[in-house]
Image: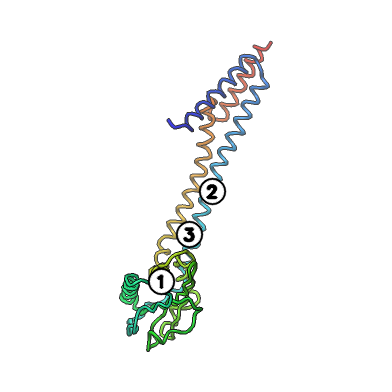
């Protein structure tokens, strides 16, 4: 038995003792007050639990709505072919990218080319974005991740050409940016993290809508479940409170018990 259960049992015992004491003294006012207090307390306790579960249900309905909106968005098409690889994968003007980190970035970019047919490269610099596309590509089917990297923060922009116009739209870039988690943190692995997050963003961009279309019905059903549980737990909590203090759960029986105690206590008082 944990401490909260023990405290609940103690409180229930004290409440029963208070009712018994009032009954023995024939104090009908205290008896009525006791029944009224328990009635109001059970109502508040039941409503409190119900409100929590209704709030949980609402959050699930909102999640289902967001999922349905995500599922309804226009999903870009993965390019049919990756096209020519960039002249080089990584250019670092910051000095933050180590040799091992550069190799890891290049491997991730090659994975992106294999999985999504998108040739990408990284330009890391402390300078504001300027056009560096031609340093990497001679065709219009690539994208450069320009990481403006500073000591304590960073920014990411995408430089692409007409070959990937349908992918790097404003709406799709917003989805890609949502996957970026390390740009605003103090780290010297910002470029590496930006590339791995870019890969996660592409997965969300191309496959996120399909995943949300499958999860939305389940989330809506979960919301319905918590709504039903709100009703169930309203009555369960009330019943538990009545049982703890020793009163009948059914209202008619409580009223009959109150009436009997008042009549008996009134005779004791006289």
Q: Earlier in the sequence, mark 2 or mark 1?
A: 2
Q: Nearer the viewer, residue 121 or 12?
A: 121
Q: Position of residue 174 (x, y in %)?
A: 49, 72
Q: Quadrant of the N terminus?
A: top left
Dot 3: element: helix
Q: Which residue is mark 1?
A: 96
Q: How many marks?
A: 3
Query: CA separation, marks 2 and 1?
Result: 50 Å
- Of badges 2 and 1, the one in the foreground is 1
Q: Is residue 200 left or right of residue 241?
A: left
Q: Find residue 258 and report its image quarter.
A: top right
* Disc nearer the start of the sequence (3/1): 3
Find residue 64 and name its label. 3
Instruction: Tell me whether circle 2 and circle 1 mark residues in contact (CB < 8 Å).
Output: no
Q: Residue at x 50, y 36 (%)?
A: 236
Tell me which label, 2 or 3, sits earlier in the chain: 2
């Amino acid at each position: 038995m944990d401490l909260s259960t023990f405290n609940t049992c103690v409180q229930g015992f004290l409440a029963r003792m208070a009712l018994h004491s009032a009954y023995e003294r024939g104090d009908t006012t205290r008896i009525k007050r006791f029944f009224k207090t328990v009635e109001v307390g059970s109502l508040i306790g039941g409503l409190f639990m119900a409100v929590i579960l209704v709030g949980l249900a609402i959050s699930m309905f909102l999640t289902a709505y967001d999922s349905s909106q995500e599922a309804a968005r226009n999903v870009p098409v993965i390019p049919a072919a990756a096209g020519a690889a960039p002249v080089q994968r990584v250019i670092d003007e910051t000095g933050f990218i180590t040799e091992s980190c550069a190799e890891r970035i290049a491997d991730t970019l090659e994975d992106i080319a294999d999985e999504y047919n998108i040739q990408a490269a990284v330009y890391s610099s402390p300078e504001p974005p300027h056009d560096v596309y031609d340093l990497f590509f001679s065709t219009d089917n690539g994208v450069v991740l320009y990481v403006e990297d500073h000591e304590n923060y960073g920014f990411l922009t995408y430089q692409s050409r007409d070959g990937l116009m349908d992918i790097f739209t404003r709406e799709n870039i917003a989805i890609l940016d949502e996957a970026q988690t390390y740009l605003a943190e103090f780290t010297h692995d910002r470029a590496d993290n930006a590339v791995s997050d870019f890969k996660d963003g592409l997965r969300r961009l191309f496959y996120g809508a399909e995943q949300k279309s499958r999860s939305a019905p389940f989330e809506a059903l979960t919301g319905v479940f918590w709504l039903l549980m709100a009703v169930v737990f309203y009555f369960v909590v009330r019943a538990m409170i009545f049982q703890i203090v020793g009163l009948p759960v059914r209202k008619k029986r409580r009223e009959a018990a109150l009436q009997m105690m008042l009549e008996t206590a009134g005779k004791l008082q006289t």
